[in-house]
Image (tube, rainbow, N blue to C red):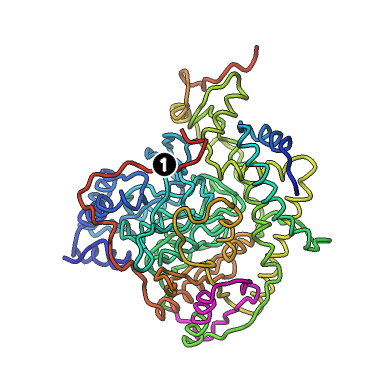
Amino acid sequence: MTDLTKLTLAEARAGLLERQFSATELARAFLDAIGAGNAVLNAYVLVTGEHALAQAAASDARLARGEARPLEGLPLGIKDLYCTAGVRTTACSNVLAEFTPSYESTVTQNLWDAGAVMLGKLNCDEFAMGSSNETSRFGPVTNPWRRRESNVALVPGGSSGGSSAAVAADLCLAATATDTGGSIRQPAAITGTVGIKPTYGRCSRWGIVAFASSLDQAGPIARTVRDAAIMLRHMASADAKDSTSVDQPVPDYEAATGAGIKGLKVGVPREYRIDGMPREIEDLWQQGIAWLKAAGATIHDVSLPHTKYALPAYYIVAPAECSSNLARYDGMRYGLRRPGEDLIATYEATRAAGFGAEVRRRVLIGTYVLSAGYYDAYYLKAQKVRTLIKRDFEEAFAQVDVLLTPTTPGPAFGIGEVSGDPIQMYLNDIFTVTVNMAGLPGISVPAGLSSEGTPLGLQLIGRPFDEATLFRAAQAIEDAAGRFTPPEPWWAAGKGAKPAKLRRRAGNPGEA
Amino acid sequence: MQVDEATVRRIARLARISITDAEAKALEKELSGILGWVQQLDAVDTSGVEPMTRVIPMTLKKRGDVVTDGGIADDIVRNAPAREDHFFAVPKVVE
């Protein structure tokens, strides 16, 4: 039998329906792969093997009765930002300690209702704040890709680094992720996977640990455009529990991937050609333009004049909302408590011990920009700039159907290579953050390899709720570029080795 | 924008995060750097521009003002760091 872990989600779905293998065999194959590779990659922070096998057995019973649901028996990884009933959920922060919700997030409930199987919880940056998965309480995730002739451990991107690494390393068929400033698309780009951040409101945020509520959105990371389309259809829903989720029918995105792009108008925003952009990123972009043209699209020059202000505006809005959302971690009702002399000292000790350095930095920035006397100068100003950014997109979408840009300013970097200056890390999101600021859908598709032999992605941006067009155009890129998989599964070398103990991040005074 | 140590301490107090002297010094530099960097927004003319309140135009949904949940006290206190019966146990608040 072929290695079941190498199948795409669509292939695995077909194989189960044709009874080529059982859901139990499929789940076992992934649990074995996790057992062999996770000690090196650190993609999963919790493996739910028994749970997975129980779900798989139930799926096998349904398959035998001919009652398969759309995702019946398909094993997925779940970012540890999603609350899972009876299964520890930490947002990869010490402040949540051993928090075990008694409820299920709407998105994951939708997946289980569709028959999917949970393999475990995936690593991410603490509260999804980071672009490299280095701020996690459980230590960094290692990218299954390495530079040519090099053993240097690279980051898998962030914040959804466990999701991107697990999908790229065949440790799940697909994964859930979340995106506040690029946290689905940037990790997808630098691991050779497909990631889509849908329109704000497309997926319910209920039960997902909140970071910045006006920007956060759930979405999948998958191996192919088609797999991402299948996943999103079953993640999205209108939900009475999230008043910002939108009552709009969820189209059959999978069908859209086959629609072709003849006559599609593709815009190329000139402001994304930034100073100092590496030659290989520019070349990749030109290659993408050529592919879309060859597939029948027309290419148009467009302007998004406020692009350069999106990132600084984001670093006002996101910390402001984060400082407000994270006020709930006070050590009283759940999570960590560090006793102090009195109530306030207990709050202060708990939050100092529970939050890592980057989270503390953002809470403090947010507290500052919202504090008396500064609100108008920072927060209000940023929200006005946000209106201008959205207006730029509206004007562009009056002329074109979709925009094409690079996803990231460069390929995967080494663990520890971009530390010290927070702003250098923030610049990873320069091409992705505009999309969150305007609430639009954006998808990253693998498009080529860097000079170092590591993956690069192209981003497509669409009109609100027009994810279907993104899947059409993304499929055209995938058809031309092919798929990108790591050259060899070096991480599985220690098959049968006992799991290494979790690496702890260094130099964090908040660490217990 | 230069943030001094007194401001860092005031913000940390507002945010209810205790910081050491060494952390205050480091944060002074980091916060000044980030706030200086976002100051480039001053170059944008926003006169007459409405601040964004929601990215997708929609009216906020309403639901009937009825009880839809309840009777789950066990679940609610289950993750508490300290509890007595169905109460959260907290440090003494009133002398």
- Judge by depth and name the residue closer to the eye, A465 or A508: A508
Q: Quadrant of the C terminus of chain B?
A: top right
Q: Is residue A261 magenta?
A: yes
Q: Which residues are magenta?
A: A259-287
- Judge by depth and name the residue closer to the eye, A75 or A453: A453
Residue, x 67% and y 51% (percent of image)?
Answer: B34
| Among the 4 quarters of the image, the one containing residue A464 | bottom right
On screen, residue A69 versus residue A310, left or right, reads left
Residue A507 image offset from top left, x and y in percent: 49, 41
Residue A281 image offset from top left, x and y in percent: 52, 74
On screen, residue A156 versus residue B42, left or right, reads left
Is residue A70 something one can see in this rendering?
no
Callout 1: 10 Å neighbours few (<14), some, many (20+)?
some
The answer to whether A273 is drawn above or below residue B2 in the figure is below
- Judge by depth and name the residue closer to the eye, A437 or A61: A437
Q: Is residue A102 magenta?
A: no
Q: Which residue is mark 1?
A: A504
Residue, x 54% and y 27% (percent of image)?
Answer: A332
Q: Chain of mark 1?
A: A
Residue A437 image offset from top left, x and y in percent: 63, 60
Residue B41 image offset from top left, x and y in percent: 74, 59
Amino acid residing under circle 1: Arg
On screen, residue A421 versus residue B8, left or right, reads left
**Disc 1 on helix, strand or loop?**
loop
Residue, x 75% and y 49% (percent of image)?
Answer: B1
- Judge by depth and name the residue closer to the eye, A269 or A67: A269
